[in-house]
Image: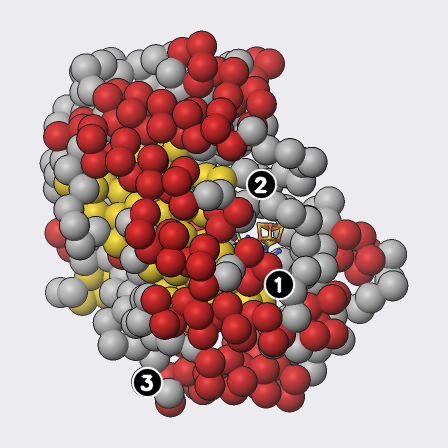
Amino acid sequence: GAAGPMAARGWRRAAAAAAAVRPGPGRAPGAGPASEPVPGAAAPAAASVYVHWPYCRKRCSYCSFNTYVVPTVDEAAVRACLVQEARTLLQLSQVKRWVITSVFFGGGTPSLASPGTIAAVLEAVAGAAHLPAGAEVTLEANPSSTTTQRLAGFKAAGVNRLSIGVQSLDDAELRLLGREHTAAEAQAAVEAARGLFPGRTSIDLIFGLPRQSLDAWTQGLEAALGLCDDHISLYQLTLEWGTALAAQVRGRALPAPPQDLLADMYQAARTTLVAAGFRHYEVSNFARKGALSTHNLSYWRAEQYLGVGPGAHGRFVPRGEGGCSREARVQLPEPIAWMRAVQSQGHGTGKRVMLSPLEQLEEVLALGLRTDEGIPPERWGRFSPHLSLEAVFGAPGQALQQQQQQGWMVLDGGGLRCTARGLAVLDSLLPDLLCQLQRAWGPAAPGPAPGPGRKDPGAVPGGDAVGP
Ligand SMILES: C[S@@+](CC[C@H](N)C(=O)[O-])C[C@H]1O[C@@H](n2cnc3c(N)ncnc32)[C@H](O)[C@@H]1O
Ligand SMILES: C[S@@+](CC[C@H](N)C(=O)[O-])C[C@H]1O[C@@H](n2cnc3c(N)ncnc32)[C@H](O)[C@@H]1O
Ligand code: SF4
C-alpha cells in the first residue's frame, strides 16, 4: 500500500523532523568559520510571535501537548509573566525594531484566558515592536469555552482569526477523544465564530480514530464542509506516548487503524476539499479564497519567531553576541517554574542552542517541503549563499532524482517542492533528502554534521532558566 499519509500537527511534527532544538554543536557566537556572513542573517526584518497558554479544563485522551489541568489558575500572575517575557525576548532579539507579521495564541486552551489577558500581551508586543493593524492575530478556541460573548471580547482585544478545535462532528467519536463538548456545541461555536470572524475562522479535525471507517470519515468531512469557513486543518491521529488513548491501543482494548486505511482517508479528504475549492497548501492544511495562515507559513518558511510562555519554541537571532546566528530557544515547560524564572530574570528560557548553518538548512528543507510552494531558490540562497539547491540536489543517481522519477518531487527554476502525490508521503521522502544534503554539505561544512548523542551546551541541568 501507499506509505502512510504523513500525519498531523503541522508545527510539532515539523519542528521535530527538523530537529527543533536538537542537541547541536552550539558553537560559540563569532567563533570559527561560522562567523562568516551567516545564513538567515539577511532575512527580512519581520518576525512572528507565539504565545502559549498552558492550561486546559480537562486533558483529552489523545493529547500530549504542554498543558496542565489545575484547580485554579492565578491568571493575574500568568498574565504579568507573559507580558514581561514578551518584552524581554523582544528586547533580547533584533525583532524589537521589526514588523510583527502575526501573533498566535496557542496552548493548551487560550480561549480559557480572559480577553483582558490577550489584550495585555498584544499591548506589550505593540509597545516593544511594530504590530501593524492588519497583522494576523490568531487565538485557538475550544468549543467548550466559546460563547459569542467571550468571542466578542477576544475580538475587541485584537484577535482577528480563530482556530477552533472541532476534532469531530460525531458525539461517539468526541467521547472517545475525551472531549467535553458535543457535535452540536462544536457547530454552534463555529457559527458564532464565523459571525464575528468571517473568512477567518479555521477548524481542526482529527481522522484515523480506532474503529473509524472510511465512510464515517468522509461523511464527517462532508458535515464539516457544510459548517466550515475558508480554512481547515486535518490531523491524522497520532497515538502519543503517555496518553490514555495510546494506552488503550497498546493494551488492545482498541485497534490501531491500519496504515492503508489512513492513506485512503487522507486521499479521500484531499480529493473532497480540492473539489470544494480548497488549496492543499500544506501537508495538514487547506485554505480557499487565500485564507492561508500567515503565522504557520512563517514557521514553514523558516522565518524568525519568538516563543513566549511555558514550553514555547522560538527561532531568532539574538542581539549583540556577534549578532548573526539563528538561535533555537525553548521556554521552561512547567508553568510554576517558568513563572519563577520570569519573575526573577525577566524570561523563562530553559534551553538555547545556536543552530549551525547545516542545521538551519535542514530546517529550511524539512519545513519548506511541507508546503505546496516548497523552497524557492531565494530562500535557500539566504541560508546557503555558496551551495545552491541545484548543487545539493541536482546530482544524477541520487535520492532526489529518483523521487522526481517517481513523480513525488520537482526541482526547477522555481525551487524544490513536492508534487501533490509527494506531499502525502513526505515523511518517507525526507530522510533520504536530509542525507543528500548532509553529504553535499560534507567537506564544505564549517562544523561536523549534527548527530545524536551530542552534549547540548545550551541546556542547563535541573531545568533552571538560562540567561540572558
Ligand atoms: C497544532 S497547531 C494548530 C494550528 C491551527 N490548525 C491553525 O490553522 O491555526 C497549534 C499548536 O501547535 C503548538 N505550537 C505552535 N507554535 C508553537 C511554538 N512556537 N512553540 C510551542 N508550541 C507551538 C501549540 O500547542 C499550538 O496550540
Ligand atoms: C492546542 S489544540 C487546539 C485548541 C484547543 N486546545 C482544543 O483542543 O480545542 C491543537 C490541535 O492539535 C491537534 N492534536 C492534538 N493532539 C493530537 C494528536 N495526538 N493527534 C492528532 N492531532 C492532535 C488537535 O486537532 C487540536 O485541535
Ligand atoms: S486537545 Fe486541546 S483541549 Fe484537549 S488537552 Fe490538548 S490542548 Fe487541551
Judge from the rendering whether residue 459 lies leftward or rightward of residue 294; answer left or right: right
* Residue 280 image position (x, y, % from top left): 36, 74
The answer to which quarter of the image holds residue 28 is: top left
Q: Which residue is mark 1?
A: 237
Number of numbered discs visible in the structure rendering: 3
Measured as percent of width and height from the top left, residue 445 is found at 28, 31
Say if disc 2 is inside 8 Å of ligand 3. Answer: no
Q: Residues within 10 Å of mark 3 (few under 14, many from 20)?
A: few
Residue type at mark 1 is Leu
Task: Please state which of residues 4 and 231 is positioned toward the viewer in this rendering.
Answer: 231
N-term-proximal mark, 1 vs 2:
2
Q: Which amino acid type is shown beneath numbered disc 3?
A: Gly
Q: Kindly report the distance in space between the C-alpha atoms of the residues bearing marks 1 and 3.
A: 25 Å
Residue topped by disc 3: 277
**How much space separates mark 1 and mark 2, taking CA atoms?**
21 Å
Q: Secondary structure at mark 1?
A: loop
Q: Secondary structure at mark 3?
A: loop
Whether disc 3's CB lies below 8 Å from ligand 1 is answered no
Name the secondary structure under disc 2: loop
Residue furthest front in the image: 149
Q: Which residue is mark 2?
A: 55
Mark sitting earlier along the chain (3/2): 2
